[in-house]
Image (tube, helix red, strand yellow):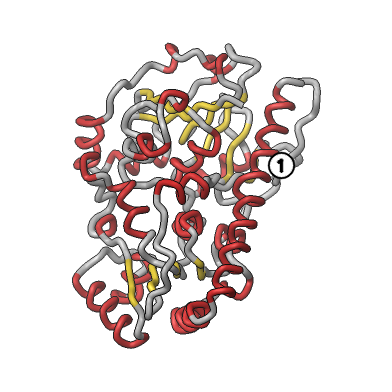
Amino acid sequence: MRTLFLKQSIDPFGPWRPVDYRREDPASILEKFYYKPTLWEMTCFLQADWKIIPSSGTGVFNRYVARFHRLAKLLARHQTEVVSPDSIDFAVYDIVISTEACLTESLTAQFPHTLFLYFMNEHDNQEYNEHRNAPAAAYDYFLDHMCGVTAERVGDFPLSISMPYLRAPDVVRKIFPRDRDRAARPKIWIDARFIARAALGSARALWTERCDRYAHELRAKHEVEIFYRSNIYRDYYDVQDPSSRDAPGYYADMRHADYFIGLTAAGAGQALCDAASLGLACVGTPLLVYHRMTCVPQALCADLGPAISLVKQWHHDERLRASIVASQDAAIDLNMRQGPLRCLELARAKKRKPSARRSATISP
């Protein structure tokens, strides 16, 4: 299925220049991403193109991002080849996925054989739940990246698809191979949000020197090596200039760890999936849907102490650690590759047979 991703010029997620997947390679495409690589893996898995259109609408995400003036200037300076949606021939694509509902019904109606889908970047709001139950009129389905964990069924026709962000661990490991030699101490990547919240005692904490001191104390107390990436949390939307290569640098930094611990109950849990794509053995929280999808059951913890103890157990048993990673790989292949792909194929088939009644929800 030929796929197109679409984003608005105000959107910091995704690439800052268009992508023609057939003319590029995964590494060069990642260089176009500002800082958050989640949709890069999905781009690689679907072999998708990207186009950027002018910002439109007054949804919660547009209002939220517009408050960050430094980010707006950065996007205006570096984003190129922004085109009108009216100039795009959507008929050449089987599937069009936009981040936010940014197309009009009059436009999408001109392409009856193209499947139009959309994600929403921000989910912790009432608007997300409204879209989950009543998708925008211009689209065939709403892609619920939270996977229905709090969805309310309204009637039998909400038209939402449970759709995690798809993964491409084969691509990630080819570009960012890891050193397989076992270190004397476990090398653990800890999610920076967890460190900030633990150090500062606030769910909305921004990174300070106190967070670095807390991480140093953890190293000494547990006799482990700790890695993290904190710059993005020093200010909200602290996105760097594209020349900083922040997105590829994220994978390049994380690959030096052997384990990942993320216990902060925020979002869906995609940072753990970044680590799993690299081949790190992961410990997560049962409160996050992606963690439950990916981790082996014994690797779902509530507290940091037991999580580090578990990592130490894995570290002293190479065969056990390998089996953990193999289980994660199988889970990702089922839950974030093959299952969702079947959903997309089914949705496309139903679009091309408009007489067929669409079910209330489509799940992997």
Q: Is residue 303 visible?
A: no
Q: Residue at x 27, y 63 (%)?
A: 206
Residue of label 1: 361
Q: Position of residue 95 (x, y in %)?
A: 58, 26
From the viewer's perspective, is 35 left or right of 295?
A: left
Q: Position of residue 261 (x, y in %)?
A: 45, 70
From the viewer's perspective, is 19 left or right of 321?
A: left
For disc 1, the neighbor class at 10 Å (few under 14, some 14 to 19, many from 20) is: some
**Toward the viewer: 321 or 41?**
321
From the viewer's perspective, is 280 left or right of 75?
A: right
- Residue 342 occupies which quadrant of the picture? top right
Q: Residue furthest front?
A: 181
Q: Position of residue 79 (x, y in %)?
A: 27, 29
Mark 1: which amino acid?
Thr
Q: Residue at x 43, y 17 (%)?
A: 85
Above or below, 30 against 333 in this view is: above
Quarter occupied by the N terminus: top right
**Toward the viewer: 327 or 316?**
316
**Toward the viewer: 279 or 51?**
279
Above or below, 40 against 282 in this view is: above
- Residue 344 occupies which quadrant of the picture? top right
From the viewer's perspective, is 334 left or right of 105?
A: right
